[in-house]
Image: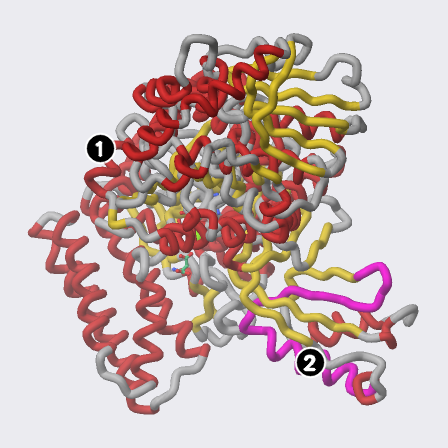
Amino acid sequence: MKIFSLHSAKNKNTMKVLKFGGTSVGTVSSINSVISIITENHNKNLSQVVVSSALSGVTNKLIAMGKLAAESNDSYLETLKEIENRHYDVVKALIDVKSQSKVFANLKIVFNELEDLLHGIFLIKEVSVRTLDLVVSFGERLSNYILAEILTIKGIAANYVDARTLIKTDNNFGNARVNFEVSNALIQKHFAANYSAIQIVTGFISSTDKNETTTLGRGGSDYTAAILGAALDVEVIEIWTDVDGILTSDPRVVKKAFTLPTVSYIEAMEMSHFGAKVIYPPTVQPAFAKSIPIRIKNTFNPSFEGTLISNKAESGNFIIKGISSIGDTALLNVQGGGMVGITGISGRLFSALARQQVNVILITQASSEFSISLAVDPSDAERAKEVIEEEFAHEIRGNKIEPVVIETGLSVVAVIGENMKENSGISAKLFSALGMNGVNVKAIAQGSSEYNISVVVKKIDLSKSLNALHEAFFLSDVKTLNLYIVGLGLIGKTLIKQIQNQSEYLAKKHSLTINLVGLANSKKMLLSNDSIEIESWEENWEKNGTETNLAEFVNTIKSYNLPNCVFVDNTSSKEVVTHYNDLLAASVSIVTPNKLANSGTYAEYKQLRKLAKKHGVKFLYETNVGAGLPVINTLEDLLTSGDEIIRIEAILSGTLSFIFNSFKEGVRFVDIVKEAKEKGFTEPDPRDDLSGMDVARKILILARDSGLELEPNDIEVENILPKSCNDAKTVEDFFVELENENQFFENRRKQAENEGKVLRFIATLENGKASVTLRAVDATHPFYSLSGSDNIISFTTERYKERPLVIKGPGAGAEVTAAGVFADIVKVFHYLV
Ligand code: ADP
Ligand code: ASP
Ligand code: MG
């Protein structure tokens, strides 16, 4: 029935509905913004209907007061006073003094009514959902009344309307269903009679045919706006809130979420049903039915376009539209051998749940038909279990179906978009992004419409899941690695500098941002779940760092649970290594030059790889051998491509390389060692280098990476020092002994020289055995002409049999080591893409 002529589908009423959410009317300054938005429309002669929520937080407080009063706790009176003052403050700030008294008087009447109501609850010690609806109705009644007064006093004709006179519902208190026929008629009649003043209508509230107060469900003011808009066939329904429209994901969780310019009705419905609070789910329906566009706008950024919800949403550049989530869900698992192949089980299951009004968020059935899982609100879980067990009591008694198991502490994450059905590979992308971050998917459901793929994950993984998925689906242009760095010595500092210098290049060439989130040395640590500015890291860390506690550092990493994390260990500390397993198990990749983890027991070596694999992360250590030289990667590439290692020979210590390369006729061995020490090439005690232990660790790692299950003791290491040198108490004594033994070294050199050879301290891996020995090599050997402190590694393989594959270059130094670590970090990222 059309009441007035402007109602025509073709010629939409030029009126619009503006709905302001609680956050838009939270403070004096935000109410000011609301007033100026309305005023601007007014000045443009635009016809408008205004719907407002209660001042932000007031609905929650009203509910709390009702409950306190029912518990005979008179502290509700304090809250009442607080709410009263909040409203009075708005009046004081926005209405001129001479007009205030009338408004105060009217507000006082309403507050007295509220106080009487709460007192009644206090006396009868009980509050029903029915009474609570009446209690919460005060929130919208107060805010809209004040809004109407402010406008009127400003000279803009405005009329306060209690929506209980317009929107009629059933008596399902708390979440009432609208009787559209009656409501539409009432709305149309009201507006036909009141066309000149702006109607300021209470959101959220409604009433039954017996005039009992009902509400449309939490967040229901959006719905009020849509009901009015549809009844009046307006041009557009504007939902004014505190964000720039519908974003790709909840901006409170996903910092990089961005506004979607257009969204289809279906997409908006899917997103809101799956937790995007920006619009109350039922809102879309009335608008959709009449093809009335909804625009989501930001009260605090009114000139921004926001999001348009309509029939024709652009597909945009992305295969999905948005990612939503439901924070708290419970999963019910119904299973049993008696379900297999039996028709009607799910029919009975869902009818039973529907009868008891249990809302099922998501359903999955294994193709074996052995089990059905369903996600419900946790508050419904116990009831749902009872309903199901009652429905299947017979089957449960006969052991055909098992008792229902409830799992809590879960969340649902949904990727949404109408475009999804035309694109393959969405699930693959979803699972790889989650898998890469160690997120275990408990259940998955894809609506047959293919507008939505939902997964159930643990609640503790929710934020990480949303961010990882957002990155995977929307930020294919730029990926972020979150970096924790332990060890801020020369290598650590150089690494940070290199990352800083390369950031532009990485962003441009690799679409990669490296985000520093944690720093520690043995004394101080600094952590951030957002970002540590790289330019000023050192001042920040010096100033704000706290005393280092590695266990706490690692626990914080776990509690942040950020996506795409890399932990860099630039130390040579055993203690840091003890945390590796824990980090990998938390899906944090590790990059390190620290050899200790790989050169402990074989079981430890194996465990690291097992954990990395299990949790979808990387453990990279190219700099364990030959610093920045590509040794580990080359070996891996050879093996992956099917080559077989026959022999590895290598000079793996820059110090020993320098010493023996310089050991020529006319130079004393002791003087070379002294020179090496002076140049800073050796450990403080050069015997730590000459013992060959460090080289042994490196060849052990190469041996293990070649597939050999060797233990540290299996490496045969030649002790090249005479006993007197080994026994010397101090470094000075050692040099004295080394001088005394000059002839011993000279003899070895001379003997080699006589055979046309030179001495080289070589690590060898051959026939399953690894050794580190001082050998004499002739001119045909690739190590013969080595000079300086270079490392050299020669791989003799099935393919490189005639002439081995040789890698040669500086095998130590902060610059090259940091660069190797850096390359590994970027490599982690490439695995993630
Ligand atoms: P109002 O008080 O205006 O009704 P709400 O708090 O009900 O506002 O809804 C707006 C909030 O919804 C935003 O502040 C934002 O935190 C949240 N939100 C959740 N998901 C999304 C999303 N995908 N896009 C925009 N906002 C979202
Ligand atoms: N004030 C109500 C609530 O907080 C309705 C709304 O804000 O939309 O739920
Ligand atoms: Mg809302």
Q: Is mark 1 within 8 Å of ligand 1?
A: no
| Residue 682 coordinates in the image, percent (x, y) | 38, 27
| Quadrant (top left/top right/bottom left/bottom right) for the C terminus | top right
The residue singled out by tag 2 in the image is 387
Q: Is residue 41 magenta?
A: no
The image quadrant that residue 800 belongs to is: top right
| Residue 513 coordinates in the image, percent (x, y) | 46, 28
Give the amino acid at mark 2: Val
| Residue 229 coordinates in the image, percent (x, y) | 51, 46
The residue singled out by tag 1 in the image is 539
Q: Tell which of 218 and 419 is nearer to you.
A: 419
Tell me which segment is drawn in magenta: 366-394
Please indicate, yes or no, whether residue 545 appears anywhere in the rendered image.
yes
The nearer-to-camera label among 2 and 1 is 1
Q: Tell which of 743 and 175 is nearer to you.
A: 743
- State the count of labels: 2
| Residue 758 coordinates in the image, percent (x, y) | 57, 14
The image quadrant that residue 777 belongs to is: top right
Residue 146, above or below 136: above
Residue 601, above or below 760: below
Residue at the (65%, 76%) spot, across then down: 384
Q: Residues within 10 Å of mark 1 (few under 14, many from 20)?
A: few
Tag 1 secondary structure: helix
Disc 2 and disc 1: Cα gap in Å? 61 Å
Q: Tell which of 179 and 495 is nearer to you.
A: 495
Residue at the (57%, 44%) spot, across then down: 323
Residue at the (22%, 79%) spot, across then down: 75
Residue 66, above or below 102: below
Q: Residues within 10 Å of mark 2 (few under 14, many from 20)?
A: some
